[in-house]
């Protein structure tokens, strides 16, 4: 009976260790890990133009500063910031990528530069979609690894001025209105 209990204990313990190792192996790798509240400026550069820069002007308020000064749509900005904090990978394609041309990263389709409070920018380069179209190739500037990121993340970051500007004709604080004629 003691031998049976010991064997059962050993088998369960070994299975738990294998499960823990499998969870670590299958866990998504963070390509870029930023805290949403620490980001002060974001610059989105597209291959075909329509570049945009927006900066934090208050605790929760953002303003488009380039190509011209505009009021930003806070919900759209929040969507971009959520996509940046953090950027998870679907997988690592190469640990040390030498030839980036097949992945569309010699001239990236999208370059997203996020500057945090300490003034150090983090540059995320996004290339072509993979052959199945469900993810895109990406890498962090200065990191030799080549990743795939979800199509949703790429779409969330692929924004221009028209997407990010406030589209209200008459910005009104409805809490301050007492009467409308």
Image (tube, rainbow, N blue to C red):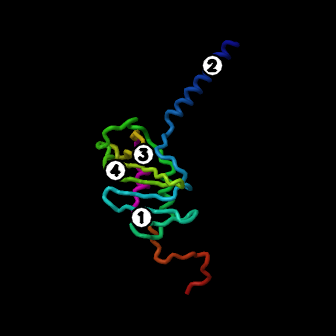
Residue drawn at the location 49% of the way across and 58% of the way down: 79
**Mark toward the start of the polypeptide (4 vs 2):** 2
Instruction: Choose the circle earlier in sequence order: 4 or 1.
Output: 4
Near-viewer residue (55 or 15): 55
Q: Which mark is residue 108?
A: 4
Q: Position of residue 94 (x, y in %)?
A: 38, 36
Mark 4 or mark 3: which comes first in sequence? 4
Q: Name the residue beneath numbered marker 2.
A: 10
Query: Which segment is the magenta one?
Result: 147-164
According to the picture, the residue beneath numbered tag 3 turns out to be 140
Q: Find the residue positioned furthest to the front.
A: 119
Q: Is residue 88 above or below residue 44?
A: above
| Quadrant position of the N terminus in the picture | top right
Give SS at disc 2.
helix
Q: Residue at x 42, y 45 (%)?
A: 140
Helix, strand or loop status at disc 4: loop
103 relative position to 86: left or right: left
Inter-mark Cα distance, 4 to 1: 20 Å
**Which of the two marks, 3 or 1, is nearer to us in this view?**
3
Label 3 SS: strand
Whether residue 133 sits left or right of residue 3 in the image: it is left
Q: Position of residue 45 (x, y in %)?
A: 37, 57
């Amino acid at each position: 009976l003691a031998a049976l209990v010991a064997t059962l204990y050993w088998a369960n313990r070994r299975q738990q260790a294998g499960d823990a190792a499998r969870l670590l192996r299958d866990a998504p790798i963070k390509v870029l890990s930023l805290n949403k509240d620490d980001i002060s400026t974001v610059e989105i550069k597209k291959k075909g133009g329509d570049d945009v820069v927006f900066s934090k002007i208050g605790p929760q308020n953002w303003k488009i500063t380039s190509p011209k000064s505009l009021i930003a749509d806070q919900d759209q900005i929040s969507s971009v910031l959520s996509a940046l904090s953090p950027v998870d990978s679907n997988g690592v394609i190469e640990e040390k990528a030498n030839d980036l041309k097949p992945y569309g990263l010699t001239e990236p389709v999208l370059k997203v530069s996020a500057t945090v409070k300490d003034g150090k920018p983090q540059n995320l380069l996004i290339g072509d979609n993979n052959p199945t179209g469900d993810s895109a190739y990406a890498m962090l500037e200065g990191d030799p690894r080549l990743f795939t990121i979800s199509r949703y993340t790429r779409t969330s970051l692929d924004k221009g001025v028209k997407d990010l500007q406030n589209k209200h004709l008459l910005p009104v604080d409805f809490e301050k209105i007492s009467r409308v004629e």
